[in-house]
């Protein structure tokens, strides 16, 4: 995140980011039975400078629902671990075949392909172990495990990725495009908000408002990702850009045009903010995050 991006956030969010990074560092120390090279690969990816949007959503939602940050932190770290595994595997030659991620060589380039597969594999059980063990009470931990497993599973993250890789199904209309992105990008963003609400013991009304916010934010996020892939800068994004067109992938700008994509991203961000009505003034941090997502440059 650039200094000007960070300046958009209230100081509380910056403090959340520092706490998330410290906790991810601690959770990824791992015991001496973990091979050194595997630990190094896991930490190389997990601690790389990402935006931490998903864990920030967990903590912000928890705080808005009156929960304790300490009890939401395991869920925040778990969702970032699942996100990281998906990035590591997405970068592999069998998938998107990328050499740059978060401004550094991707895991399989810095280490090797087998190590990258295993580092991604290892992050999945580690995420669920932390979520189940460190969330209180046990009933809430179990609800969180089910929610995250569903979001990361075959009908959401993995299914969306499978359809996205299958060019035979390259969507030619906005509805099919959104069906992919609701699962590939939207599911983890939405469950982040749900996890925050669950750890805070929020009412069904608050939880549903947050889930609704997440669904709209997920689409806004993806549209902006497509626009940045078209016209962003590799130096700022920290990854190769312009790949979608080369791979023949359908994107929002390709399907509805650049101007309509910009308008739709703004529309989705406003719809996300509108979902937060019942939170009144407490919604400000999520309003700021929605604006950040549509105005981001990386
Ligand atoms: C391998 C099951 C599996 C899924 C991969 C991560 C992913 C799904 C695809 C990556 C392709 C892509 C560009 C998706 C768009 C949305 C997205 C997940 C962007 C990366 O997330 P950011 O921008 O990344 O939050 P940082 O590095 O800031 O955490």
Image (cartoon, rainbow, N blue to C red):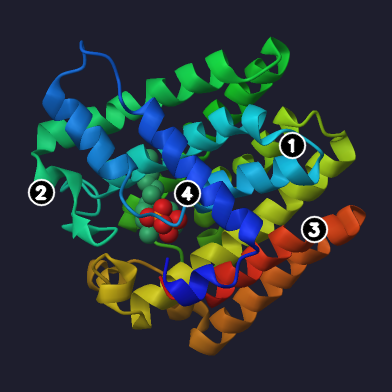
Query: Closer to the N terminus: mark 1 or mark 4?
Result: 4
Q: How far apart are marks 4 and 2 (CA)?
A: 24 Å
Residue at label 1? 197
For the N terminus, the image quarter is bottom left
Query: Which marked residue is nearer to the observer: mark 3 or mark 2?
Result: 3
Query: Closer to the N terminus: mark 4 or mark 2?
Result: 2
Query: Closer to the N terminus: mark 3 or mark 1?
Result: 1
Residue at label 2? 109
Percent of width and height locating residue 48:
30, 49
Q: Distance between the residues labelled 3 and 2?
A: 41 Å
Name the mark on residue 283: 3
> Do the CB atoms of the residues marked 3 and 1 lie less than 8 Å apart?
no
Q: Quadrant of residue 205?
A: top right
Q: Is residue 127 visible?
A: yes
Residue at label 4? 184
Query: Closer to the N terminus: mark 3 or mark 2?
Result: 2
Query: Closer to the N terminus: mark 2 or mark 1?
Result: 2
For the C terminus, the image quarter is bottom left
Q: Is residue 98 visible?
A: no
Identify which residue, 190 or 69, lies in the foreground: 69
Q: Quadrant of residue 81?
A: top left
Q: Could you tell whether 106 is left or right of 60 in the image?
A: left
Residue at 49%, 77% (x, y): give it. 4
**Number of numbered tags placed on the structure image:** 4
Q: Distance between the residues labelled 3 and 1?
A: 13 Å
Q: How far apart are marks 1 and 4 (CA)?
A: 22 Å
Q: Is residue 4 above or below residue 287?
A: below
Percent of width and height locating residue 206:
84, 43
Q: In this view, does 41 lie above or below 245?
A: above
Query: Which marked residue is nearer to the observer: mark 4 or mark 2?
Result: 2
Is the CB of mark 4 within 8 Å of ligand 1?
A: yes
| SS class, disc 3 | helix
């Amino acid at each position: 995140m650039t200094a000007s991006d960070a300046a958009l956030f209230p100081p509380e969010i910056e403090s959340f980011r520092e706490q998330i990074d410290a906790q991810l560092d601690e959770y990824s120390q791992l015991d001496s039975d973990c091979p050194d090279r595997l630990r190094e690969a896991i930490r190389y990816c997990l601690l790389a400078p990402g935006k931490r949007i998903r864990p920030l959503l967990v903590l912000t939602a928890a705080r808005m629902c009156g929960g304790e940050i300490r009890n939401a932190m395991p869920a925040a770290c778990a969702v970032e671990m699942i996100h990281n595994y998906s990035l590591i595997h997405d970068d592999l030659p069998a998938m998107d075949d990328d050499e740059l991620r978060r401004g550094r060589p991707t895991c399989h380039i810095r280490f090797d392909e087998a190590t990258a597969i295993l580092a991604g594999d290892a992050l999945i059980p580690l995420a669920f172990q932390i979520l189940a063990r460190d969330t209180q009470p046990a009933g809430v931990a179990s609800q969180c495990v089910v929610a995250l497993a569903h979001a990361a599973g075959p009908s959401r993250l993995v299914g969306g990725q499978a359809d996205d890789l299958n060019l035979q199904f390259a969507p030619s209309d906005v509805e099919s495009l959104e069906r992919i992105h609701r699962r590939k990008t939207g599911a983890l963003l939405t469950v982040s908000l749900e996890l925050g609400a669950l750890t805070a013991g929020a009412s069904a009304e608050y939880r549903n408002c947050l889930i609704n916010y997440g669904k709209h934010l997920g689409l806004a996020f993806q549209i902006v990702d497509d626009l940045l892939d078209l016209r962003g800068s590799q130096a700022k994004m920290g990854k190769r850009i312009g790949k979608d067109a080369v791979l023949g992938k359908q994107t929002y700008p390709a399907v509805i045009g650049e101007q309509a994509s910009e308008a739709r991203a703004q529309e989705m961000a406003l719809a996300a903010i509108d979902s937060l009505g019942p939170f009144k003034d407490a919604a400000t941090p999520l309003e700021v995050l929605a604006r950040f997502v549509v105005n981001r440059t990386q």
